[in-house]
Structure formats: structure tokens, C-alpha cells
Image: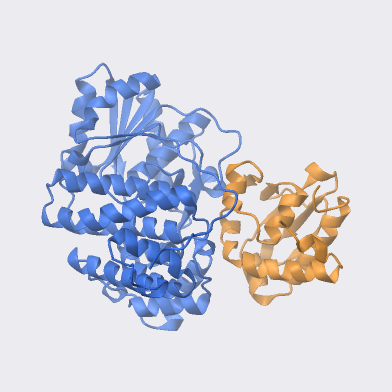
Amino acid sequence: MKIAEIGFESFFTWNNRPKILYSPGVRSELAFEMNKLGGHRVALFTDRGIVDAGVAEMVSEEIRNSNLELAGVFDKIVQDARIDIINEGAAFYRECQADCMVVVGGGSVMDTAKAINIMIGDGVDDFQPLARQGALWDDVNVLPPQIVFPTTAGTGSEVTYAMVILDVEAGVKLAATHPLNADVAMLDPELTLKVPAKVTAFTGMDALTHAIEGVTSTTAEPISDALGLHAIRLIFQSLPVCIREPENVQARGNMLIASTMAGMCFGNAMTGAVHATAHALGGKYGIPHGLANGIMLPWVMEFNLEEGALRYAMVAEAIGIDIRDMNPNQAARAAVQAVRRLKEEIGLNETLKDFGVPADPEKLAPMVDLAGSDSQLPFNTREAGEEDILNLYLKAI
Amino acid sequence: MKYWSDPAQPITAFMKLFSKTTQDEDLRKSMLGLNQLILFDYTQDGPDCAIWLDARNNQLSYGPGKPPGEPDLTLSTGADEAHLSWANKLNAVQAITRGKIKVRGSAAALLKLAPKSKKTAEYYTEALKELGWEDKLDMK
């Protein structure tokens, strides 16, 4: 099969701000980059797990051995970017009189730090009104310098302008966007070597979902295609290696690069029904986001084939499947099978049943309702109504 | 304005749209879930070019011009962009990031209505046809 020319909207925009540096040990460039940004007194934001694993220290050491000053370490960030922690983090930044921020962590840490930086720039004490507004694109203030080190290869938050915020009081997750994300993203695979196999597997599936949904979304365009498709190549090559050989720096590096590229892809092209259904699973059953994505991905791909075969054929080709003798439907189905095989290979065999999700349409109704009103759903290749969403959940149980 | 001959036209079209969507059980339920007073502010195209939707206290009402109170959410844009938006021909994310739609107040609840945009667009097409404004459906 020869892939036909794939259409796209005649007008699209491309947003991507952070400068990116990659290398094993690239943290040694931190002071040089921060000096250029004008930062001197660093507040380091991370979480307890990163501190206990010695990863935060790998970055702190670079700060101490440079002309930068470590004003303080805030390690209270927990799973999900919580408004109460965000407010506490902003107060911490002010108390220690920092003038710049270094962030070491996964998606929750990076999202929390993004919100804290906006609060510092805006001079406010409470992030809740901003989280509820969601779109923070007007009257934008200059933010303090921020350099981020992602420690998992999945979220892509280091390059997206969105943050998912948990409003603990209201018990809801809110998506907020702001045009100024980090100034610099430093991809240092040495910081990811100690990530456990299970977390490596599901964060890797998160990155794969970003890439596949970005490439197949209704707002896909050539730049996001290029990034998403190469991310898919790298993930299929390197994710199994990271599981087998956790200290393989090259494979870890490829996954970090893939995750960043997938982040750039979906940050511009949006996602689809995998994210819509996974957000609801996270909210109702506490299933980690990457794992929920990994469970839903093949089922949503299968559902979408009917209307998006050509784009899924592109995915198949990026996976490394020889599609020359296949029609688009065959190639698209081969892509779904390859995703299922990859999940097996990396040991992701969970179904929704393992998390207590009931195979009862009545009990699933609130979750169907949540997924049906998710802001990512309109970007799905194929329109998914309530019955479709229910069927997707039932299949994934 | 590209699609409208005067500022009264879009208000007529949007009021007709609201009369349809507020009678649809599914959309009505979703709108009540907003529990907000929302102002759709198109005054950049005329001083009275605005409509409001009041979904507070489990009741629905709507009207042209100034809202009956301080809005919880104001969406400011041009009447042309609004036309494209109600017709589901506007990429809202892009419009917000490029400053074509300005958001003031809590938009979290409204975002949940995004998946209803296709159905809303069907009612909008109906409304325009009933007003004899099929020509406005040509949005190339």
C-alpha cells in the first residue's frame, strides 16, 4: 500500500516555547542556561519520591557546584497538581526569596510548578480562580525563569502549555492553559534510570497515546504528524528495551525524546476518546493516567478504524509494519495488533476489571457522562456518543 | 462583518438558536449543569450586539443585550467568529490562543459542553434556514 496524501486544515498554528537540551548528564548545563535567563536564587520543586530516590540531589548538586544559590527545596508535591499544594508552593517561593525555579519530576510536579510560576508572575495568592477560568491567554505577565527536568518519559508536560489541576474542595480536575510554560526543558536520561518497570511501562504508554491520538486527531497537521510519527518509532524501538534493561541510557534517552515529541504533537493537535475515557477513569477509580490510557488505547483505535484508517495506516508504518501490500484498513488493524503486542511485551496486562470497574451499564453511567463531556472528545477521529463510550468501557473490562 | 449586514442580524440568529437548544432535553440538561450566568459579548460589532444565557438555580432563560446581573463568565468575540463557533466551524482552542475569543470568569463548566457542539450546530443550521439565511451557511 502506498499512503495517499493526507489532508489537513488549510490554517493551523504551531505553539512551542521551551528550548530543549538533550544529553545524558545535561544537568551540568543548568547554571549556564539559568544565568542566561537571569536567575540566581533557585527554588527547586520536586516530590518526596524523587528526593528519596536521590534524583533531586543529582540536580541540587549541580546548583551547589555553580554560581547559582539554592534558596530552598519544596518536596511536598503529590500525585495530581492540587490547588492547596500549588498555593503552598507559591508561598514557599516567596518566603525563600527565590528569583527562579528548577523543577525535577513527572507530570504532577511539572503541572504544579507551572501553576506556581503563573501565580508568582501574576502576584496572586490563590490559584483557584485561575484554574476555574481555564484559558489564561489574556493580560499575560512575564514569569520568573523556569527550567524543568522530566523524570518520567510519558507526560510531555515539559513542552505543553496545559496543566491538569485537581480542585480538592470541589473534587474535580480542571484543565488550565497559559502561553508561558517552561523556558528550558532539559532531557537527562540519567535521571530516569531508577524509574520502576511498571511506571516505565505505563508512562511509556501515555507517551504512545499522545502520539497516536495526536496523529489521528481531527486537528492533526503536518508538523504534529512529523513529531508524533517519529515518537511512535522511538517508543516501539525503545520502550521494551527500557523494561528489559532499565539502566540502558540510550533507550531511556530515546523514550525521553519520544515523550517530549509526543507532548509537542498532542499539545498542538489535541487528543481524542482515549484521553476522554481515561480522564473519567482517573477521576472515578483513581487509575493512573498512563495506565488508563494504555488500557483504553487499543479499544479506541479499533473503534476509530472505520473513519480514520488512512491515518492509522501512517501509524502502522511508523511502528515498522511493512504495509506495502496492505490496504488502509488492513494496515490500520495491524497497528492495533502491534499496540496489543507491545502492551504484552512490557507487561501491561491490566483490564478495567482489575480496578473494580463494574460491567454494569447503570453503574457505568456517571463515567460515561463524564467522558461524554470531556473537552478532548470532539477531537476524536470518529464521533463517539454515549452508547459508543459505554461499549468502549465494557470492552475494556 | 463578513457574514452579517448589521449587528441585529446575528442576535436574531443566535436567539433563534437558543430557542431551539433550550427545548432539546439533552442540551437543556447540559446547560442547566452550567449553573452560571454567561454573557456572549459581541459588542465589538455594535453596542447592543450581545446575548446572555442564565442557567442558575436550575432554571433556563436567555435574552439579548445586557444580562440580568453580573456574569459568571464572559466570552468576548466578534459576531463573525461567533457565527463560525455556533456552526462548529471554529477551532475554539486556536481562537482562544490567538486572542480571537477572550475569556473572563470560570470557563471550566462551559468546556464540558464542547462535545455538544455538533448537535448545537445542527440546530443553528436549522435556525438559519428558517430565517431564510441559507447563504450564511457558506463559510468558505
Quadrant that contains the C terminus of chain B: bottom right
At x 44% / y 70%, what residue is drawn? A309
| B75 sits to left or right of B134 | left
| A171 sits to left or right of A69 | right
At x 40% / y 35%, what residue is drawn? A18
Is residue A164 visible in this depiction of the protein?
no
Look at the picture and state if A99 lies above or below B28: above
Q: Where does residue A389 sit, x and y in percent of width and height? A: 46, 75
The one of A81 and A247 positioned closer to us in this rendering: A247
Which chain corresponds to the colour blue?
Answer: A
Q: Where does residue A51 sit, x and y in percent of width and height? A: 20, 39
State how the image is colored.
Answer: by chain
- The part of the image, by quadrant, that contains residue A256 is top left
The one of B1 and A285 positioned closer to us in this rendering: B1
| A188 sits to left or right of B57 | left
Q: Where does residue B56 sit, x and y in percent of width and height? A: 68, 61
Is residue A244 visible in this depiction of the protein?
yes
Q: Where does residue A38 sit, x and y in percent of width and height? A: 39, 19
Which chain corresponds to the colour orange?
Answer: B
The one of A19 and A307 positioned closer to us in this rendering: A307
At x 23% / y 19%, what residue is drawn? A66
- The part of the image, by quadrant, that contains residue A353 is bottom left
| B88 sits to left or right of A309 | right
Residue located farthest toward the top when viewing the structure as drawn: A67
- The part of the image, by quadrant, that contains residue A88 is top left
Look at the picture and state if A352 lies above or below A185: below
